[in-house]
Image: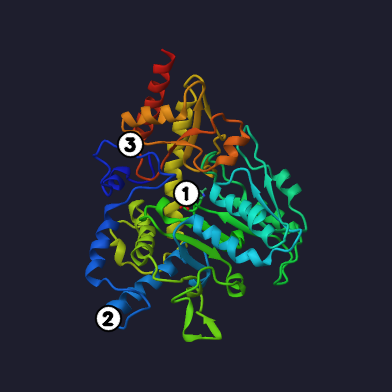
Amino acid sequence: TPPFDVERVRSSFDFVGQGRVATNNAASTQLPRELLQLYGELVPQYENVHRGQSDASVRMTARFEAAFDTIADWIGAPSRRTISIHRNTTEAINLVMYTLLTEFRDGDNVVTTMMEHNSDYVPWYALCHEILPRFGRRVECRIARFDHETGALDLDDLAELVDDRTKLVCCTGASNFLGTKPPLPEVRRIADSSGYPQPNGERRSWLLVDGAQLVPSALVDVEALDVEFLAFSFHKFLAPLGVGVLYAKEHLRRGSLPFLYGGDMIAEGRVTPDRVEYNALPWKFSAGTPNILGVVASAEALRLTIDLTGADPGRTWFRSADRIPRAISGAAMARIAAHTTSLTQRAIASLSTIPRLRVFGVPQGEVRAPLVAFTVEGLSPFAIAAALNTRGVESRAGCHCATLAHHDLGLDPPASCRLSFYLYNSTDDVDRAVEAVRAAVAVTTG
Ligand code: PMP
């Protein structure tokens, strides 16, 4: 039995009852009704933040700023000063690339992995192959392999690639294709072993974790993991589109150039023709009018996650305090992981009985992201996805932006079909999805 009442969870989502089997959650999760109601509630109080003296503006500002605290608390960050809000994970990782641009020395390298989403590979490719060469600097982009059988990151290869010129290691927290989660403490240890002399006196490679699939599936503690950077997107965590988060250690933010320049990222009144003073953190990284409602809704999505999974039933979720005790958020995420892991295991077990079907990434209990990608010999992943769609089953065919891994596995065409689960999925969803795959395969084999 699931660790929470899945039917009660489903009653918050309007896609239920439309005949949709919503199993493309690794792309984006569905929107709960409570968050749409929240938008309705905020409309009569609508105002910009940091840009007005009305009661409405002051209230909205307080709510917006409190959302930073909630988000920081959720990932174990020490303060809102370590958080900046962007459009998505992709923009957050690009921020790191652009703000470190000036710091790479000739002969340095950046180490990433073959499991990365394009948003954690293409920026480093561009940095090394396109941007820095224009400044006459040669920086190498190295790519650590993964085990083709298990889908696990090859830590020996990673350790071999990291050396005393490795400024930065970039690693996914969970692969959106293989489902595997690299052991981040090990990755940290390898990044530490480099002894790379950072400009702030530290002797270690900095570590960036792409948390897009990790943060919605497990409670993350940035201080315990000791990562320099963590990026994730709220649209994979129940919230509306358009909100990405970058956690960065405060001393790195203080020492860094801003990313975007303009309004609100400067200290009030401190712009003259020959001198510009930047705003205090976190607003130094908040140029221009932000996605205010999206940020407020994202913090509420975290509270809703707790309420939906029954950690504190009966609480009026969007009026609760800003700070969420870790024990409560941890309990909610453990329940989600237990449920989605069992759905994933069920899916993998049944899919594996289908002839000619290959599942990628070996199941590893709760240390696996709640998704399964597969191919069927002689059948296009796109044809499978289209066949599933005719039965209301939502999937994704293609590379899922994990293009390096598809090529590395020799998939021709470089594509797979993926099902991915979240807290509102039921065992019935899984069974319907797998039956649809079975039917698609049966049709082509006659
Ligand atoms: N990294 C991973 C592992 C992802 O799954 C995704 C989303 N597919 C991203 C990065 C990019 O997220 P976004 O599209 O929100 O920038």
The reply to whether residue 221 is visible in this rendering is no
Q: Look at label 1 and name its amino acid.
A: Ser
Q: Residue 283, percent across and down?
A: 47, 74
Q: Is disc 1's CB within 8 Å of ligand 1? A: no
Image position of 163 with respect to 409: above or below:
below
Residue 389 visible (yes or no)? yes
Q: Is residue 181 left or right of residue 52?
A: right
Residue name at image x 39 percent, y 70 percent: 289
As drawn, is 258 to the left or to the right of 426? right
CB of mark 3 within 8 Å of CB of mark 1? Answer: no
Q: Residue 279 placed where, x, y %?
A: 50, 79
Quarter of the figure with the C terminus: top left
Report the residue at 32% width, 43% height from top: 6
- Would you name the residue on which mark 2 appears? 55
In the picture, the disc for residue 217 is: 1
Q: CA distance from mark 1 to mark 2?
A: 38 Å
Residue extending farthest top: 446
Residue 78 x, y percent position in the rendering: 53, 70
Label 3 element class: loop
Give the residue number, with chain letter if any, for mark 3.
21
